[in-house]
Image: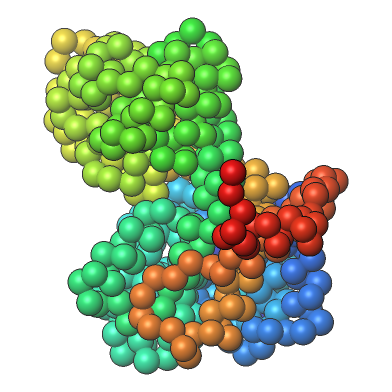
Amino acid sequence: MTTPTSGVAGDVKDLALAPRGKARIAWAEKDMPVLRQIRERFEREKPLAGLRISACLHVTTETANLAITLKAGGADMVLCASNPLSTQDDVAASLVADYGIPTYAIKGEDDETYYRHIATALDHQPQMTMDDGCDLVTTLHKSRPELLPNVIAGTEETTTGVIRLRSMRQNGVLRFPVLAVNDSDTKHLFDNRYGTGQSTVNAVIRATNLLLSGRTLVVAGYGWCGKGVASRAKGLGANVIVTEVDPVRAIEALMDGFRVMPMLDAARVADIVITVTGDINVLDRAHLAALKDGAVIANSGHFNDEINIPALEALATQGHQTVKDFVEEYTFADGRKVYLLAEGRLVNLAVAEGHPASVMDMSFANQALGAEYMLKSAAGLEPQVYTIPAEIDREIARLKLKAMGATIDTLTPEQEAYLSAWESGT
C-alpha cells in the first residue's frame, strides 16, 4: 500500500514514476479540448461538490484527465483499475502524488489484488459509481449490499458492462439507476469504432511487429468495435474475414467488402484472429485446434473470456512459453505453434496505450456531463439503465466540431416548419 508524503492513500507500483506520468497526462490533455472546456466550467460551478465517487476504470492518461475534471467539479473520488493489465503505472503514481486522487492500480496485478482494490474503492462508501465493465457494480451488489442505500446513481463506460447491467435489471437485482455512457452516439460511434480500431491494430503490431499487408486477419464480431478493427486492418492491406452470429451485421460486413464465414472455416486460413464480441468462447476448442502453424490470436473485448484459454492450454501438450513481452507460444502435439497476445485480455490496453486521447475526449465528456446529469436527475429515476439525453450528446458533438475547426449549416425557419408539418406532399 502506498502512502506518499502528501498523505493521499493509494496502491501503485512506484511513486518515483510520477514525473513521467504527469508529463504524459499533460500530453493527452492537449488533445482533449471538450473535456478541458467542461473542466473549466466545473472549476467555477462545482456541480459535484462533496459527491463521493468510486470509479473502476482503465487507469490511463485519458482517464487521469477525467479524474482531474471530476475533482475540479468538487467530487471526492477514489479510482481503481477495471482490468489487471490496462494500468499505466506512471499515470497511477502521478494521480496519487501530483493530483491527490487515491488510486489503486498496478499493471499486472493478480486477481486477488484486483478485487482487493475494488473492495478498497467501495470502502469509500460511494454515492455514485463509475464503471468500465461493471465489476465495481456487481461486487457492490454481491458483496457489499449494506452500501447500496448510499448510492444515488452510476455510469457505465463500455458495451460489456451495459450488457451486464441490463441483465441485472431484467433479473430484478439492480438497485439504482445507471447511465449507459456507451450508448451515447458521441461515444460508441467514435470510441468503439475509431478508438478500438486504431488501438487494437496498433497493439497487435506492437506486440508482434508483423506486417499486416497480405495476411489473412479474422475479426470475430461486427459491432462498432469490430467495424473499426476490420476497416483499420483493411487499410493496412490485410485480407479481412468477418465472423458473425447476427445476419444483419453479416450482410453489412459483406457489403462493406469483407468475406463472411463461420469461425471454424475462418480459423483454418487465419494468420491473425481478433475477437471483439463481448461473449464467451468465441474462439473455442474446435477453432483453436483448426488454427494453422504460426497463427496469432488476440482479444479486444473487455474480459478474457472470448478465447477459451483452458482449451488452448489443454491442446498445447508440448507446453507453452513466453517468447517476448505479451506474446506466449503454445505448442500443439503435432508441433504447430499458436501465439496468444496479452493473456487473452483486451490487447489494446494491455500492450498499447488504449484509445487515442482525441476520441476519449468525447467519451469522457459523456462521463463528466453524465455524472452531473445523474446527480441532478437521479431522484426521479427508477433503478434501470438510461441513455444520456440527446441534447447533451449533441452539445458534446458541437464542442468537438468547434475544436476540430469545422462548422455546419443550421436549418432555416422555413426548413424547420417544413420538417414539422404533415400537409406537404407530392
Front residue of 122/19: it is: 122
In the image, residue 420 sits, relative to residue 137, either above or below, namely above
Residue lying at the far top in this picture: please name it.
214
Residue 143 appears in the figure: yes
181 left or right, relative to 266 = right
User: Residue 327's quadrant in the figure?
Assistant: top left
Give the colour scheme shown: rainbow
Residue 389 picture location, percent across and down: 56, 69
User: Residue 312's quadrant in the figure?
Assistant: top left
- Identify the residue at image location x=37%, y=54%: 160
Residue 289 picture location, percent across and down: 17, 20
- Identify the residue at image location x=31%, y=70%: 138
**In what quadrant of the picture does the C terminus appear?**
top right
Residue 211 picture location, percent across and down: 53, 13
Front residue of 311/420: it is: 420
In the image, residue 68 sits, relative to residue 195, either above or below, namely below
In the image, residue 409 sits, relative to residue 343, either above or below, namely below
156 left or right, relative to 383 = right
Front residue of 312/215: it is: 215
Residue 1 appears in the figure: no
Residue 344 picture location, percent across and down: 35, 38
- Identify the residue at image location x=40%, y=13%: 216
Q: How many numbered markers are drawn?
A: 0
47 left or right, relative to 119 = right
